[in-house]
Each structure stands twice: as structure tokens, then as C-alpha cells.
Image (spheres, helix red, strand yellow):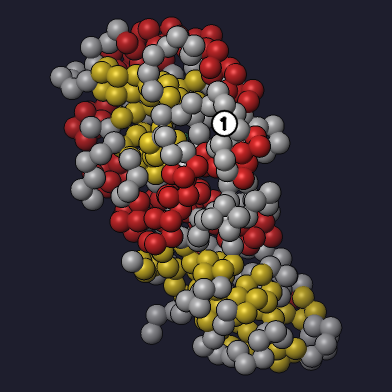
Amino acid sequence: MPRPILATIHTDALRNNLQVARRAAPQARHWAVVKANAYGHGIARVFEGLRGADGFALLDLDEAQRVRDLGWRGPVLLLEGVFEPRDLELCSRLDLWHTVHCSEQIDWLAAHKTHLGHRVFLKMNSGMNRLGFTPERYRAAWTRLSALPQVDEISLMTHFSDADGPRGIAHQMAVFNQATQDVPGERTVSNSAATLRYALGQQGGANAVPELVSDWVRPGIAIYGSAPDYPQHTATQWGLQPTMSLAAKIIAVQDLACGATVGYGSSFTAEQPMRIGVVACGYADGYPRLCPTGTPVLVDGVRTRTVGRVSMDMITVDLSPVPHAGTGSKVTLWGRTPGGAVLSIDEVAACAGSVGYELMCALAQRVPVEVLE
Ligand SMILES: *Cc1c(COP(=O)(O)O)cnc(C)c1O
């Protein structure tokens, strides 16, 4: 028998979450961001749930190839553009739209031999200081690109550093709008947090930034059912549903006497007699090693906590609130149970000082995955 651990991808939740994003920006077209192998879910596994998107955005050329192999003929956007000149051949062959964020990428395009005009997204560094042309250099880049016979259409793009936090997006929007005032082209600025929080009529509607104009929005984390601004909002508050569940079973039970310790480093000591369950999931499965005693888990759908250190292949959980649980009982590490109970990946991530993004992306190769239609 295989080790009793299983990740489940929920197709219905992907569809629901895409709808949540659409309701927040009904006028925009929506990229489903599927970089990092669809945030750890697997591109092929999410494809059915996300085929209602208007396009797929990602960074890796192999992943772009996979999206085409799945039969997707609509837009595919390379969020970081090409990494070397020969990548442009693949862009021509697979009809990939690509970001242009630096002058080298323009040089490569100028030297690229193609009869197919490329659609490019010219990226502005409006304050995040990772990728893009500064506002001062943006127009010159646009002018240079627009003169190239290899370029068919130029869209305008930037990315927010603080859409999920108190600093917000207004300062970057002002920079972007100022520098693109009379530059033609479609615009794309919003990630999940900006899409949800700065939408008119949404919960963040009080913050609505009227000058935020998006022809395309780029939701990633929200479509995977994690709140982009946890803990200010929970996924449930945004109407988002978990798209990945991680579940395992109890493989052993220990009855602890008062004073007994658990696991490596004896980091947990029983203060009264108690039962604990040993769960077939550890950090080698992607469960964060930094989750301390007290991290929530569901045993048979009942909320309880981890005790002691996470080890490579096992964690230990307090069975006090679930006296009937024993070997074979189902433990949900995050996501939802067949009975409909939900444990937010954001809550587990926060216990480890991390974010839902990282936990999803870290789901280990050794964990078998099923897709629920
Ligand atoms: C990853 C990414 C997104 C999606 O961000 P989320 O926070 O997951 O919504 C959007 N735009 C760009 C450029 C990205 O790299």
C-alpha cells in the first residue's frame, strides 16, 4: 500500500475563485497566473478548472509549451519575457506574448528574424525596483519598440509592491499614469490583492482607486483560494475556496503520561495524560518544518493542534478533542474535508511565519495528487 498521504486539487474551487476575481473586475480580461507549475498544483491539473480564463500567464518556457500542449490556443504571457535571444523563436512558434522589461530584450527583438509580429507587454518599474523601465526611460523604450517590424502591438504593464498592505497602490498608480498619459495600448497592473482590494463595490471598495484602469488583470494566489491579504481578510471573507487539500492518515497512537515528551528535541511535554496521533506527513512532503506546537490540523474533520517538532516523514497531533480517532483516521493538514470542514492554508502558513503561496509551491514531488472534477 502507498504511504497514506494525498493532495487533492479541487476543480470546482478553481472555477469559483476565477469567478470571484471576475466579479471584482468584470470589465477586465483575466489572466490565470500559472507560474511555478500553477503554484504547485500542476498546470495540467488546474487546466480544466481555469480554462474559463482569458489567458494564461507564467514565466517558464517549458510551462508555456505545456499550456499549448494542453490545447490552449488563446493568449499566453511570459511575465518576465525571454531570458535569451533564442527564446524568441519559441515565442514566434508558440505565439507567446512576452513582457519586455529591459533594453537587452529590445536588442534581441530587433535582431530576431520573424515574419510574425509579436505582442509585447512593456513593463514599467513604478517603484518596486525589480523589473521594468523607470518612468523616465519608459517612453523611449516604447518608441524604440514601436519602430520594430517584429512588434505588432505594445501593451503597458506594471506590478505593485504593496497591494496587500497599508502602503497600497496609489503612489505607483500615480507614477504609472503620469508616465503613460498619452502612450496608447492596453494596460495591465493588478495582481490578486489589487484586483480584490481596489475593486469598486468589493469589501476593499472603500479603498477604490478610480484611476486604476486595467484591460487585463493578473490574479494568481486568489484563484488558488488563498487570501492575498491574510490576515486582514480570510479567504472565506473573499468568497475564495481552497483548491489544494493535503490530507494524510494517523499511522500510530501514543498514550502519554504526564511529563512525557514528544519528538526530536523533546520540544513538547505533556502536562497531563493525553493521546497523540502520529501522522504520515512531514517536511519532506512540504509541510513546513517551522510549524510550532499548536499549529491547527483537522482530525476526522475536528480541529486540533500539532504537538512537538515536525520531522521529515511525520508530525504528531493532539487527539484530546477527538477521543474516537485512532490509527487510520484522516488528518487534513490544509484545505477541505469531504465533510466540508475547511482549514485555511493561510492559517497554517502564518504559524510557520510564511504565506499560502510558499506552502502550495512546496508541495513535494513524493505526494500523490488526485484531481476532483
Ligand atoms: C506572480 C505574479 C502575479 C500574480 O500575483 P498574485 O499575488 O499571486 O496574485 C501577477 N503579476 C506578476 C507580474 C506576477 O509575477
Quadrant housing the C terminus: bottom left
Residue 3, image x, y percentages: 44, 79
Q: Which residue is mark 1?
A: 160
Tell me what residue is drawn at x 38 percent, y 23 percent. 186
User: Can you tell which quarter of the image residue 201 is in?
Assistant: top right
Closer to the camera in the image, 290 or 354: 354
Residue 263 visible in the picture? no
Residue 112, image x, y percentages: 24, 18
- Relative side of 308 to 224, left or right: right
Specify few, some or many for label 1: CA neighbours under 10 Å numbering under 14, 14-19, or 20 or more. Answer: many
User: Can you tell which quarter of the image residue 283 is in?
Assistant: bottom right
- Relative side of 16 to 301, left or right: left
User: Can you tell which quarter of the image residue 89 is in?
Assistant: top left
Residue 233 visible in the picture? yes
Closer to the camera in the image, 126 or 265: 126
Quadrant housing the N terminus: bottom left
- Relative side of 263 to 69, left or right: right
Tell me what residue is drawn at x 51 percent, y 88 percent. 328
Tell me what residue is drawn at x 62 percent, y 92 percent. 324
Q: Is residue 125 above or below residue 230?
A: above
Closer to the camera in the image, 334 or 197: 197
Closer to the camera in the image, 138 or 293: 138
> Label 1 amino acid?
Phe
Residue 368, image x, y percentages: 39, 69
Q: How many marks?
A: 1
**Mark 1 residue CB less than 8 A from any atom of ligand 1:** no
